[in-house]
Structure formats: structure tokens, C-alpha cells
Image (tube, helix red, strand yellow):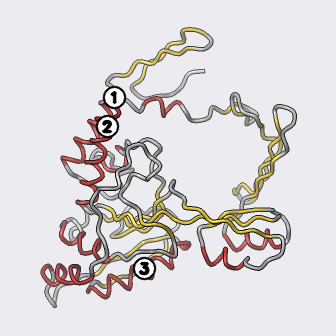
Amino acid sequence: MKLNLKDVTQSVIDDYTIDFKLKSPLVIFPYYLTKPVITHPLVGIGGEYKVRHLKIKSDFVREIELIPNTVNLPVKIYKFYPNEDEVLNAYKKGEIDSFTTNRKSTANYFIGWNNTTISKEIDYSKIMVLFINNGNKLLNIKEIRKIIAYSMPAFPDYGTKAVGPIPPTSWAYNSQVKTYNYNFDRAKNLFNKNFTSTQSAGLTLSTFFDYSDIADIIKNELENVGFKVTIKLVYDIPDDFDLLLSIWNPPADPDQYYFWHSTQKTTNITKTNNIKVDKLLEDGRRIINPKQRQTIYKELAETVIDEASAIFLYHPFKYEIKRQ
């Protein structure tokens, strides 16, 4: 089996060894080799399960049934629903025995239900982020982005405050990086300094339906400062936007080259273009020593936060609704 890896040559040494040669050092290269290898008929190499049944309706996967490759393991059935309302109905009808949600209102609905337990934990694998389009003529100005940063309130009902782009579960996490705390007076003063009464300060806030309640809170805060905000519901990440509110899954390794480096035209959705950020990202990939990398990524987090390319709001709560 030959893996399709750009700028990497490979040769098979024996049944257990493959030799990879890279054009330049890339300390995170092993992470690219951790993705599951799937063969027909949908069997993971070395995996405990294989797919026995796959149900598709209107190009949407509705159900996957897995059977074990070894004895003493149960059959597993996963059901998929296009929205949370259908998930709720499926649970009520007994089609599923458990599901997870980030919505507190959904979890509260099941308080008092017989034979149903509700557990809550912080999902550090996700961050609710307000991405700012640095390529926008207005938002290209750092002080304008800082107005937005100082306008963001805490969201204690939705999660725990995020400290930059690297989560607490990472070995490179540093809790001492500077963050923006809600400061209405400072935001208002910066707004008055940068806008006249006749200037247009209109922004479009794009988001997904599931986050519309958070978008409403942000809209109110920004309008209190002086912006005029229009909320736009989207179904995919738009090619162009002013502000984008969405859940982000930071990578397992603190390398975030694809998200902030100026050369990454597709994945750098904020259009961040900062020489220092580029250099830190390049060094973080080149250097192997963990302590040196930790120092690099602490500085990276501080720089990204200071640039206000994106506002890292919170790690969401995750609720599991489970039938006893």
C-alpha cells in the first residue's frame, strides 16, 4: 500500500517498516500517519470492528452497524440525525439510548425524567471562536479588532473561558498568556476614537443555526458599543465574511500552521498575515526539542491573541443524556 503524501518519498524496508524521506524537517510528521487506514469492505486495519450494514437516505448516512472482529465484543449501532430535534424525538421514542449535546436547554429538558441521567463535562477538544476577517478593509485595522475583543462577555452558562488557541489538554498550554476580558468602557473609548458619527460601522456576523443564541448575545454587545450588526445564518464556512462564529477543533499537536500561516489561503480563514506569526509557526515545525517548542507556542498564542485575529470565547460544556 502506497500512501499519497506530498513532498515525501517512501520505500518499504520489510513487512513492519516503511522509510519516509522528507524534503525538510517536520517534527509533526508522525501525526499524519495516525489516521485510520480503511480497506474494503470498510474494515479498519488492526481494528476491532467492521461495518456490516450502512443505511443511507437522501445522500445522508442515517445508520452504521458495526460487528466485532473478535469475540466477546458487542455489536454497535450508530444513528445519525440531521438536526437536534430529530435526536430528541429518537430518544423519546426509544430509538437511541444516549446522545450528547452542547445545549444546556436540551439537557434541562430531561431533568426529572425517570431512568434518565444527565452528566456534564467540559469539552476541551473544542473552542467557540469568533473569527475576524483580517482581509476586510475595516477589520484589517488592529485597533478595530480590539474593540470587538473587549466587547466579548463571559459565557458561564455555555462553557469555561478559553485561554487562546491552545487548549489545557495540550503539553504546550500556558495559562499565563494575556487574554482580553470584557471591558465596555475601553471598547467604547476605542470605538469613539476610531469612528466619527457619520462613518459606517456595519458588520455582518455569520454563524450556524446551532449558535444563533450566542450570536444574538454578541450582536447586542457590539451594538451597545456602536457597531451595526446583521446576523447571517450559513450552512458552511463562507468564502467571505466579516465575523464568523463557530466551534473550532484545534489540532492535537500545537502546530497550527494551516490556520494562521499567511501562505495557507484555504484554511487560514481569518486571512492572518503576520511576519512574526509565520516565523513562529515555521520554527515550531522545524525544532524537535519539546521545551523549545513549548516556548515557541507560548509566544505564538500570545501573538495571535494580541493580533485579535480571532477571539477565543470558551470551551463548551458537553452533556450526555443516557437511559439507565
Ranked by sequence position, the earlier of labels 2 and 1 is: 1
Specify whether 143 is left or right of 111: left
Please state which of the two labelled residues, at mark 3 or mark 1, is closer to the viewer: 1
27 relative to 264, above or below = above
Specify whether 53 is left or right of 34: right
The kind of residue on which mark 3 rests is Ile
Q: Position of residue 195 (x, y in %)?
A: 15, 82
Q: CA distance from mark 2 to mark 1?
A: 7 Å
Specify whether 297 is left or right of 276: right
Ranked by sequence position, the earlier of labels 2 and 3 is: 3
Q: Position of residue 267 (x, y in %)?
A: 39, 50
Label 2 close to label 3 by CB (< 8 Å)? no
Q: Which residue is mark 1?
A: 288
Q: Which residue is mark 2?
A: 293
Instruction: Name the one closer to the observer, 101 or 138.
Output: 101
Residue at 66% of width from left, 33% of height from top? 38
Dot 1 lies on which element?
A: loop
Dot 2 lies on which element?
A: helix
Q: Which of the 4 quarters of the picture holds residue 178?
A: bottom left
The kind of residue on which mark 1 rests is Ile
Q: Which mark is residue 231?
A: 3
Label 3 close to label 1 by CB (< 8 Å)? no
Instruction: Name the one closer to the observer, 98 or 260.
Output: 98
Label 2 close to label 1 by CB (< 8 Å)? yes
Q: Quadrant of the N terminus?
A: top right
The kind of residue on which mark 2 rests is Arg
Residue at 37% of width from left, 77% of height from top? 153
Question: Which residue ends up furthest to the front in the rendered image?
Answer: 176
Please state which of the two labelled residues, at mark 2 or mark 3, is closer to the viewer: 2
Residue at 28% of width from left, 59% of height from top? 305
